[in-house]
Image (cartoon, coloured by chain):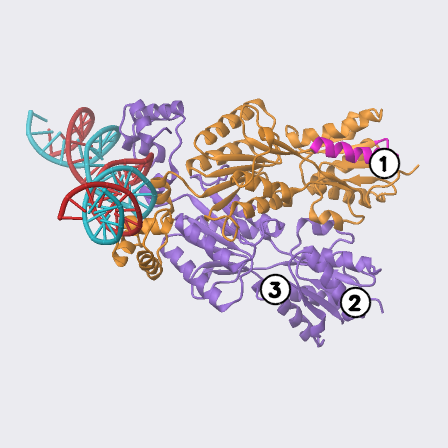
Chain colours: A purple, B orange, C cyan, D red
Amino acid sequence: MTVTLADVAARAQVSPATVSRVLNGNYPVATSTRERVLRAVDELDYVLNGPASALAAATSDLVGILVNDIADPFFGIMASAIQSEIGGPGGRAGGERLAVVCNTGGSPERELTYLTLLQRQRAAAVVLTGGAVENAPHAAAMAAKLRKLTEAGTRVVLCGRPPADGTDTVALAFDNHGGARELTEHLIGLGHRRLGYIAGPEERTTTRHRLEGHRAALAAAGIEGDPALTVHGRYDRRSGYEATLELLRRDTSLTAVVAANDSVALGACAALRESGLRIPEDVSVAGFDDLPFSIDAVPSLTTVRLPLAEAGARAGRIVMGREEPPPGGIATVRGELMVRGSSGVPRS
Amino acid sequence: MTVTLADVAARAQVSPATVSRVLNGNYPVATSTRERVLRAVDELDYVLNGPASALAAATSDLVGILVNDIADPFFGIMASAIQSEIGGPGGRAGGERLAVVCNTGGSPERELTYLTLLQRQRAAAVVLTGGAVENAPHAAAMAAKLRKLTEAGTRVVLCGRPPADGTDTVALAFDNHGGARELTEHLIGLGHRRLGYIAGPEERTTTRHRLEGHRAALAAAGIEGDPALTVHGRYDRRSGYEATLELLRRDTSLTAVVAANDSVALGACAALRESGLRIPEDVSVAGFDDLPFSIDAVPSLTTVRLPLAEAGARAGRIVMGREEPPPGGIATVRGELMVRGSSGVPRS
DNA sequence: CGGCATGCAGCAAGCGCTTTCTACACGCAG
DNA sequence: CTGCGTGTAGAAAGCGCTTGCTGCATGCCG
């Protein structure tokens, strides 16, 4: 049998109540008693029963972090930053919390299911990262779930995701629109007029905002957007590779390829190179996010840096109540254009 | 107040016991009753209280995954594979489990603390990934903790980590030694004689095994290992960059740089390039792991592919009892040499 | 010196669920 | 017609912890 509070109490010759109070440190206990208890805990190698304590106290130290793809550094970096502020072991925060990263794989159902699971565990807090799926029924279901979580006392923060309508959940949204626009403006400034765009999966806010930013830049410059120059795909390298070949098939006159993110851009580079095109002499390429490997591409990738770690850390602090939420509960986090080797003046 | 089992029972006009049985499906319940209960659950939007149920049943559906660095795709890929087999939402397994990814940051203390946290939550299973810290007291503490977890009924599997002495924990270890050896043999076969080695952090099994494999290859070829040609660092790009500059400072005659992993190798490439050296004409570079971006480096990286996803999936299945553990509880997973553009014949 | 605030510890009532054991109603064999 | 197996539902005893309240010494005030 495992050791229980009562065993510790017996050994320390105090009541279970006292042991509990020593362990939680939320009630005055005489120093001598405390020491006796702690010694007993140590000697018996006692480990608190989490479920029991969560049940009795009606609280838990679980914090959930939802990500779309844990294998993607985009989410890994945010999750890492969030976790470090949540105050797991070694974190600066006081009580030890168990930060759990849940991988939704971008699936709306799983997102909802994980939220239910966290609700079931009476999670203390939840951070949702990544773009949302744009689909009315799902959005409504999410909003309802978030409201329920909030009601149950779970703090919720969205990180890198637009505010959820119908909730007053705190949101730290990335300025995908602005970043994409700035990026495309840069390319246009260089002289590009026919730009291909490799978008992410459809029905995602991130995808849409980046695409709209791109188109806004085109429109502002009086460039007619050609639908054939936009291809949708996933947020991975392979998708960028395939989409680029498709783009090349559709229109060989393009001088620049703007990708939904850096991984896609890398795939695009590979496809261009294999097609005998030089970067940026023949075709310029741009990514988004500025993940660590982007600077190592050859030529290094022109992209928009998103302050993933900073935003994650901030979300973590807010959800733990260690930082004031932004006014109105909504903040837009801007990206920064990083002009590097993969973009240049178009061939004439 | 939140809805409880009793509320559902009242609404369905049955006893709480019956509701519990319907929800757990482990006891015969008349169809008409079941339907009535399910309807009530639905109408009340009831969500089971996890802690309470874990306490009463003395089990939990939490599964822990320990990783060194969640921002590193090496771990992200494994975690993703493990999680998909664990049977979280959408997984193929039956009961829904909450897979929690814990980020130790490579710190021994945090590793231990997370294990305690998981023990406290009475986790159903735990998978530890990544190399272990080589340090007698810590190893002993870990072994003790793992034993305790096992005793308490938590299934434990090590993935990409050598067996823990003093436990009979199932382990899927990567053949870092063999992979490194093969890689260096490849370089030697190309004609390289002075190879720099950028090792990972000291006191890690992964670091040591890879380094030993490298040296074994050198020794087998009768090449004297020069201690000045080995530099230790972290497993990241920046570390590779700095270590390479240091290596170049120490010995400008080297014709190849072998890195502890792909990220380090990318940093090495950057440093070489900035130093005016061509890859592979002037200096060959090799990595380890074959992460997705490695093929996109220019030139693409020669490296050793580790079947991260496969190993993770297998570990996940084993820990869930859906696959037999390997004979003896220990399996060695081999890597595969990927010869690509970053390695070539040395300049004469 | 009585009385009362104060500090510390224990009692005991749950927290919401699971599960064993018991109860009841049938239906059918003896 | 009695008795018993079978199928289904309920009563109730916890699971191990937290916490409001009570109780008992102290020490200090008036």
SS class, disc 2: loop
Q: Is residue B40 left or right of residue B88?
A: left
Work out how far the residue at label 1 is from the one at label 2, CA to CA, in angstroms.
38 Å
The magenta segment is B176-194
The crowding category of the residue bearing disc 2, from other C-alpha atoms within 10 Å (few below 14, some 14 to 19, many at least 20), is: many
Residue B45 falls in which quadrant of the image? bottom left
Which residue is label 3 attached to? A207
Q: Is residue B140 left or right of residue B337?
A: left
Task: Determine the main secondary structure of the stretch shown in magenta.
Answer: helix
Label number found at residue A255: 2
Residue at the image position 53 percent from the left and 50 percent from the top: B92
The crowding category of the residue bearing disc 3, from other C-alpha atoms within 10 Å (few below 14, some 14 to 19, many at least 20), is: many
Work out how far the residue at label 3 is from the one at label 2, CA to CA, in angstroms.
22 Å
Residue type at mark 3 is Thr
Label number found at residue B255: 1
Q: Residue B298's x, y, as percent?
A: 79, 49
Residue type at mark 2 is Thr
Q: Chain of mark 1?
A: B
